[in-house]
Amino acid sequence: MADVKEILANPAPLGLMGFGMTTVLLNLHNAGIFTLGTMILAMGIFYGGIAQIIAGILEYRKGNTFGVTAFTSYGLFWISLVALLIIPKIVPGFEGPGDTAMGSYLFMWGLFTMMMFIGTLKKNFALSFVFGSLFILFYLLALGHFVDPVFGTIAGYEGIICGFSAIYLAMAEVINECFGKIVLPIGKSILK
């Protein structure tokens, strides 16, 4: 019987697009360009949330611990963020988090992201940029709750850059695979 090599598709572009597009849209709101509404919440549940969880499960199948941890965690971040926003509106007696609680939530996600950023230093530059800018985004958002709301507005503009960097990396992986060569560069790892 001949050996059959199983070929698995790369799930990272799905997760990166779910993260990137949802991040851009939420941060357009944070920058004050439009109000928070059902469009952002729906993206948070379905594309930022569920699509990233699916990508994470598929990364498990490929044996990619970093991908599993990143995509499932950030997918669950989006679902938990939407829950924090809508549960107080639909469940009587539940209040939304105050500034200290929300700042703490964002700080913890920033801490997680900082540790994940360290893992990217042996991967490509584009991925390091995504995680580095996400780390900054979480801490700017936390400062917006702990110190002054102006940090939240600054975070909005920085978050748009972060989201578009994830979209770029996703499309670079897809387009480069389609063409069988580097069309959109992603750079070498920062650490050898």
Image (spheres, grey):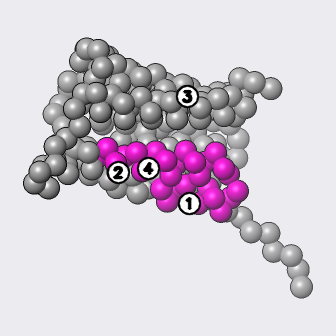
Q: State which tag comes first along the sequence, 4 or 1.
A: 1
Q: Residue furthest right?
A: 1
Q: Secondary structure at mark 1?
A: helix
Separation (CA) of disc 3 from disc 2? 21 Å
Left or right, 47 with respect to 122, comes to: left
What residue lies at 41% left-to-right and 23% top-to-bottom? Answer: 139
Task: Indicate which disc, 3 or 1, sits on the residue closer to the N terminus.
Answer: 1
Q: CA distance from mark 4 to mark 3?
A: 17 Å
Q: Main secondary structure of the magenta part?
A: helix
Q: Tag 4: residue type?
A: Gly
Q: Is 61 part of what is drawn in magenta?
A: yes
Q: Is residue 149 above or below residue 181?
A: above
Q: Which residue is mark 3?
A: 114
Residue type pointed to by label 3: Met
Rounded to the nearest angstrom, the CA distance separating label 2 from label 4 is 7 Å
Category of crowding for the residue at label 3, using alpha-carbon neighbours closer than 10 angstroms: few (below 14), some (14–19), many (at least 20): many
**Spot occupied by residue 90 in the image (x, y as percentages of width and height):** 13, 55
Question: In the drawing, what numbered circle is on residue 75?
Answer: 4
First along the sequence among labels 1 and 2: 1
Q: Is residue 122 visible?
A: yes
Magenta extent: 53-82
Judge left or right: residue 125 versus residue 81: right
**Mark 2: amino acid:** Ile
Whether the residues at callouts 1 and 2 have beta carbons within 8 Å, the answer is no
At label 1, the amino acid type is Ile
Within 10 Å of disc 1 (Cα), the crowding (few <14, some 14-19, many 20+) is: some
Please tell me whether mark 4 sits on a helix, a strand or a loop. Answer: helix
Image: 18 above or below 101 = below
Give the labeled residue for mark 2: 79
* Residue highlighted by disc 1: 57
Image depth: mark 3 or mark 1 in front? 3
